[in-house]
């Protein structure tokens, strides 16, 4: 396939909408280029971001030259896209209905609502509705029934209702319209996912001003949620936006948080580092829980931890650990329903974003061995305990199981926190997090079970782990802690060593490591995870700078006394958020453009924690020395040719 370079927007040229079941990406040109129904990990119905020709889209765009802007309604996840031409202007409002009834039950309609309103003059608009169910693999044709445009795929129907007449093309794979809107005119579009055979039982979504009522209820839900954020510092807008992003990525039926709502957006254009991130990673858990609690949301943190614990093998009834056979282990990632199987598959029918193949669904890393998970789970449990959550006898059984697994398995090599597909190796951070597991288990034992006979053994084993890491993880040549025992490569994950309490921030060995990380992996505000030419990670090609690592560095600089520099770095990083304040997984240091899946939860968690650290020192004489950064609520103008 010949790539049309103009067929793809930048990864950051999108806003995210969702209903805490699934999500969609809406481009600055009014095109929905990614959407899955009914869940985050379901097959796509629109995937133009992964193949401009075959993926499918729902575009509402002026058919002549225009400028545009995009913003969220204040403290909300309701998205507005503005278009201005030489003759007029219009606003496109996009959202997925989600709110709570007075009885506190959730309401999610499994649909996208688009409201197009001409605000001045006249403006010509082209509508192109081109759904491609099942990642573009469905061969079902579109048809009209009861003035609704319908496309089927196996057990569901995708139904479009609109106040404008659309014409289905001869091939039956698209519905189109060209309209001239005048001031005050409004068009409504409702795309619903409906189980086959249930459609007629659902009343028209266009009747009785329902779309506007649903918009107001959804907007009120998000605004009320924003008001609960316990932070009033100078970065409140971007912290609230990150908090709202996290909640768009929560699968509300279980409480799972997906790492990102997308799959296979490349970590380098043209490269093969393209992964499916629509799963929950244990790696992220301690940081997520820390961020939620520090923003005043302990209840949410508890709910997330309980889901993690159950997904890892806890019984719903007794909270007792289920027995694993010898070949089973705690998985590093889980599906949003708690299942473990996420078999990886390559979709050869899609070319990938800007021809960055392959497109993958599922994630083969689910069956990797990673010893760090024990530390992340027990660090989470300890965080909750320090905020008043009681550790019961059943919980203590789980603590003991995790601690004993860490004590037993840390001597074995694993795939590491970055899930490298080379190796396995003895990763420094993996072993350090096994130490964290034992350290937090000891602390929990001292709080609740001081007479448990395992505690002295854990103390001895924790000391053995620390001695091993300090000796074998240290490179005399690099004068730094390195990625793993078999290598001298640097790894930004070692920034976690003091953040997790393994070593003091001002220990000369860590300060030397910090200096080496900055020399080898830092480029201005950007920090790479590691150098791909030095690490056998089993994947070909380069990658961008990992944005989370930059936020880790901000936290570390704050703690080692370089607070003014940390503040300046943080503010510079914020200028690389997109026009809505959203971050992808990575950034290309050369262009500053977003790379990887978008938006990424872990990045926004790192942003929240870095913001809290950066504003947590009132006596900092350089506190006022921060650069102006882009206002996420402001409109960003773009020139485009419509049609």
Image (cartoon, rainbow, N blue to C red):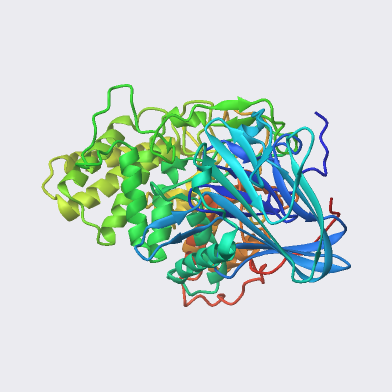
Res 250 seen here: yes
Q: Residue at x 57, y 28 (%)?
A: 536
Q: Residue at x 22, y 51 (%)?
A: 444
Q: Is residue 360 above or below residue 48?
A: above
Q: Quadrant of residue 634?
A: bottom right
Q: Residue at x 66, y 71 (%)?
A: 627
Q: Position of residue 519 (x, y in %)?
A: 62, 49
Q: Residue furthest front?
A: 146
Of the 4 image quadrants, the one containing the N terminus is top right
Q: Residue furthest left?
A: 451
Res 515 seen here: no
Q: Is residue 140 above or below residue 617?
A: above
Judge from the rendering whether residue 9 lies leftward or rightward of residue 464; answer left or right. Answer: right
Q: Position of residue 477 (x, y in %)?
A: 55, 38
Judge from the rendering whether residue 39 lies leftward or rightward of residue 161; answer left or right. Answer: left
Of the pair 288 and 354, the residue shown nearer to us: 354
Of the pair 97 and 351, the residue shown nearer to us: 97
Q: Position of residue 162 (x, y in %)?
A: 67, 53
């Amino acid at each position: 396939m010949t790539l049309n370079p103009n067929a793809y927007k930048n990864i950051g040229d999108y806003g995210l909408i969702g209903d805490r079941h699934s999500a969609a990406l809406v481009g600055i040109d009014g095109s929905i280029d990614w959407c899955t129904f009914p869940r985050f990990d379901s097959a796509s119905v629109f995937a133009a971001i992964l193949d401009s020709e075959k993926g499918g889209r729902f575009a509402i765009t002026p058919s002549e030259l225009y400028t545009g802007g995009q913003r969220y309604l204040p403290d909300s996840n309701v998205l507005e896209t503005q278009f201005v031409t030489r003759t007029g202007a219009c606003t496109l409002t996009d959202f997925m209905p989600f709110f709570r009834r007075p009885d506190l039950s959730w309401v999610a309609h499994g649909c996208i609502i688009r409201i197009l309103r001409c605000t001045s003059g006249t403006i010509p608009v082209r509508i192109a509705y081109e759904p491609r169910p099942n990642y573009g693999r469905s061969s079902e044709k579109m048809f009209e029934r009861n003035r609704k445009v319908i496309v089927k795929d196996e057990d569901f129907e995708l139904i479009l209702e609109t106040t404008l007449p659309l014409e289905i093309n001869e091939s039956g794979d698209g519905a189109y319209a060209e309209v001239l809107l005048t001031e005050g005119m409004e068009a409504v579009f409702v795309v619903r996912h409906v189980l086959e055979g249930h459609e007629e039982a659902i009343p028209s979504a266009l009747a009785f001003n329902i779309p506007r009522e649903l918009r107001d209820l959804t907007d009120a839900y998000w605004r009320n949620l924003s008001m609960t954020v316990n932070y009033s510092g100078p970065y409140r807008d971007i912290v609230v936006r990150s908090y709202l992003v996290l909640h768009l990525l929560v699968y509300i039926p279980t409480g799972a948080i997906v790492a990102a709502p997308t799959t296979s957006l490349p970590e380098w254009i043209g490269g093969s580092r393209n992964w499916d991130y629509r799963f929950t990673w244990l790696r992220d858990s301690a940081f997520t829980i820390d961020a939620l609690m520090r923003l005043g949301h302990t209840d949410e943190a508890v709910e997330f931890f309980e889901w993690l614990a159950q997904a890892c093998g806890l019984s719903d009834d007794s909270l007792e650990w289920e027995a694993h056979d010898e070949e089973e282990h705690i998985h590093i990632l889980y599906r949003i329903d708690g299942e473990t199987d996420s078999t990886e598959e390559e979709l050869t029918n899609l070319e990938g974003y800007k021809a960055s193949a392959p497109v993958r669904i599922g994630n083969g890393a689910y069956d990797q061995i990673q010893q760090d998970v024990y530390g992340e789970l027990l660090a989470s449990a300890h965080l909750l305990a320090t905020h008043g959550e009681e550790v019961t006898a059943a919980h203590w059984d789980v603590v003991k199981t995790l601690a004993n697994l860490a004590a037993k398995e840390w001597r074995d090599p694993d795939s590491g926190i970055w899930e490298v597909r080379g190796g396995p190796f003895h990763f420094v951070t993996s072993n350090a997090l096994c130490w964290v597991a034992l350290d937090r288990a000891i602390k929990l034992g001292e709080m609740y079970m001081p007479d448990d006979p395992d505690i002295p053994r854990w103390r001895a084993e924790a000391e053995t782990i620390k001695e091993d890491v300090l000796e074998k993880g240290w490179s005399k040549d690099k004068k730094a802690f390195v990625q793993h025992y078999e290598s001298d490569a640097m790894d930004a994950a070692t920034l976690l060593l003091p953040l997790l309490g393994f070593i003091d921030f001002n220990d000369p060995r860590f300060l030397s490591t910090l200096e080496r990380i900055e020399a080898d992996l830092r480029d201005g505000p950007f920090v790479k995870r590691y150098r791909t030419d030095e690490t056998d990670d089993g994947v070909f090609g380069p990658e961008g700078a990992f944005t989370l690592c930059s936020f880790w560095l901000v936290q570390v600089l704050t703690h080692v006394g370089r607070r003014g520099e940390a503040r300046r770095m943080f503010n510079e990083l914020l200028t690389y958020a997109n026009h809505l304040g959203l971050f992808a997984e990575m950034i290309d240091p050369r262009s500053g453009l977003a790379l990887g899946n978008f938006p990424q939860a872990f990045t926004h968690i790192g942003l929240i924690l870095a913001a809290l650290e950066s504003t947590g020192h009132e006596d900092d004489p350089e506190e006022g020395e921060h650069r102006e950064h882009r206002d996420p609520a402001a409109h960003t103008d773009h020139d485009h040719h419509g049609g």
